[in-house]
Image: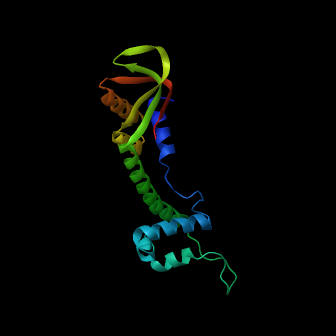
Amino acid sequence: MNIGEATQAHMDARYPSGEPISAATTDRGRIARMNALEKAHGGPRGAASAVGVSRETWRRWRLTGRDPRTGKPRQKPGAAGLNKLAGAAGQIYRAAQARRAQQGLARARGVRMTGIIRWDGYLNKIPQRTVRVADQMDLSSLYGPWERGDLLALGEAFEAAVGLEHSASIQVEGDEAEVSWT
């Protein structure tokens, strides 16, 4: 994997979305997303408004199991409702992920990279190597390209951040690059 892919893989693993593992189609997944929306929007009324459904529809979606009087299954959201619910909850999870990533990138520690590294045009005798870049550095410039999914810009931003830290231009070449920090 190239430097952009390696950086994205590390960031995705380091800053997970926090979205529930259960699918939105299951009762457990639906209720987890509804709870998150209610917490973020100040209760059922705000959550229903954020999803674009009535308060009564929200109340019916919240119920699980069977109706004790009729024995029939309770109403669940259809495909369009599930898409609305998953979309609105996804925004909340992505916002939380973004906050964690921005805070973590501002104070990245123990930054390391592995690959064929060219420092100011010079290639070392041992081309494939692991380098401890810095004990602590600011990698905030990586956030924008990571959020957009732009691998080329992400790789360039990482190289620029490391180059700025070392007052040198660097290029990580090859398809066996790795990146890590804590």
Q: Is residue 179 visible?
A: yes
Q: Residue drawn at (46%, 39%), measured in percent from left and top?
A: 8
Which one is in front, 56 or 179? 179
Q: Residue drawn at (42%, 77%), measured in percent from left and top?
A: 45
Q: Residue drawn at (43%, 34%), measured in percent from left and top?
A: 111
On the picture, is 65 further left or further right than 104?
right
Q: Is residue 78 visible?
A: no
Q: Residue furthest bottom?
A: 69
In the image, residue 141 sits, relative to residue 172, either above or below, namely: below
Q: Position of residue 41 (x, y in %)?
A: 40, 70
Which one is in front, 162 or 54? 162
On the picture, is 182 further left or further right than 32?
left
Q: Residue drawn at (55%, 78%), measured in percent from left and top?
A: 60
In the image, residue 84 sits, relative to residue 99, either above or below, namely: below
Which one is in front, 148 or 169? 169
Q: Residue furthest top?
A: 125
Instruction: Examine the image and state in which quarter residue 69 appears.
Output: bottom right
